[in-house]
Image: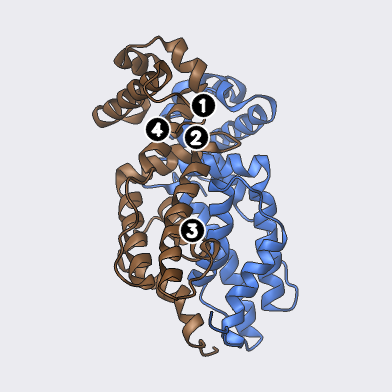
Chain colours: A blue, B brown
């Protein structure tokens, strides 16, 4: 559901689907700096003023499309254990977001202006998936860390590294971060 | 030193100083979407083609200016203890980056294209300051955590929250993250 809350099947929803589809098609064909609102509008079969009225400008439109791409379409994989579920989810996030297309999505999200709605939707999707994983663990009788702590210890370092660090993350970093999160709860870390 | 490595005092350095100064002046006067390369060039007293030749496009120019703003101009504060130094540095980063101007700087950095040089310079500045703090702690006879771990545990969650989470960070979050980083090394965390 977009922040504008279109009725499903209504004109608003049709415009949104056409414009989002046009953006995705153009992104597959052209470098970023060639994409303009008039081009998107022409491809979607709407007027540029429809796009400006609804999204404000190109940056906000791209951020909205980026957030929509991140909307989860399934529950997180159930591997039978908290560690397994967290590693699977973190690996999937790392793989998707560190791809060239994923980096573009993160950049578009972050470029969206304050109050940062599209980036906030991405964070909410992540927390929703982690809520599902931790609820499953509680149903198994376990005591998972709070979702906020998982975001800080696992998702934030992955995202920071993708956006700010030139050297690539390895897939093994996902498991390393999850193990560091879960380890102190099981055994003390030796000092020094 | 810019990636282009201008000679200090040479024409290249003068152009860089004039163009950076023009961007900062325009950013103080106008909303982002009104800033253009011709406007920056006119203010700096250079031709637009000089700007395009050197920076590529407006996004890369803004990212370069953002990185230059983050260059530390002093060693991190020496409070006499590792915890004190880390909390002071994390609080300063949190305050600067979560201000409206700081958020703009982070957004501009992240918008810079692959290979993400300006964002990488920001990360390198952060690691440089943390190297100074941990070297000081080793000179005191202490055993500080590796800089990479401090980035993951303290700087990454602060940055992620500024960019992706609508609710504001409190200054106390900086000390909370530092204490969580340092705590398991001193005493075991109880399970559950």
Identify the element where label 2 is drawn. helix
**Residue A176 pos. (x, y %):** 66, 68
* Image mark count: 4
| Residue B48 shows in this picture | yes
Q: Is residue B29 left or right of residue B14?
A: left
Q: Are marks 2 and 3 in contact (CB under 8 Å)?
A: no
Residue depicted at 67% across the width and 77% down the height = A82
Callout 1 touching callout 4 (CB < 8 Å)? no
Percent across and percent down for residue A1 are 52, 49
Q: Secondary structure at mark 4?
A: helix
Chain letter for mark 3, please.
B
Number of the front mark, 1 or 2: 1
Quick one: label 1, few (<14), some, or many (20+) residues within 10 Å? few
What distance separates the C-alpha of mark 4 from that of mark 2?
25 Å
Mark 1 or 4 closer to N-term?
1
* Label 3, label 4: how far apart the Cα atoms are: 22 Å
Mark 1 and mark 2, same subunit?
no
Which residue occupies the extreme left position in the image? B29
SS for callout 1: loop
Badge 4: chain ID: B
- Compute the Cα span from label 1 to label 4: 14 Å
* Residue A61 marker: 2
Question: Residue pushed farthest right?
Answer: A79
Task: Using the rendered image, report if marks 3 and 4 lie on a common chain.
Answer: yes
Q: Give the crowd class for mark 3: few <14, some 14-19, many >=20 residues within 10 Å.
A: many
Residue placed most toward the observer, A116 or B3: B3
Q: Which residue is mark 3?
A: B156
């Amino acid at each position: 559901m977009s922040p504008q809350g279109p009725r499903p099947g209504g004109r608003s929803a049709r415009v949104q689907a056409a414009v989002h589809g046009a953006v995705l098609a153009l992104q597959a064909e052209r470098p970023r700096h060639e994409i303009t609102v008039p081009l998107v509008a022409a491809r979607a079969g709407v007027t540029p003023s429809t796009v400006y009225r609804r999204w404000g400008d190109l940056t906000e439109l791209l951020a909205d499309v980026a957030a929509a791409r991140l909307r989860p379409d399934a529950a997180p994989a159930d591997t039978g254990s908290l560690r397994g579920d967290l590693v699977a989810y973190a690996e999937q996030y790392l793989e998707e977001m560190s791809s060239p297309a994923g980096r573009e999505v993160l950049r578009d999200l972050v470029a969206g202006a304050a109050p940062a709605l599209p980036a906030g939707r991405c964070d909410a999707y992540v927390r929703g998936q982690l809520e599902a994983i931790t609820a499953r663990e509680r149903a198994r009788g376990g005591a998972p860390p709070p979702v906020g702590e998982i975001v800080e210890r696992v998702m934030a370092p992955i995202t920071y590294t993708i956006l700010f660090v030139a050297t690539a993350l390895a897939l093994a970093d996902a498991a390393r971060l999850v193990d560091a999160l879960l380890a102190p709860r099981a055994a003390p870390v030796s000092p020094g």
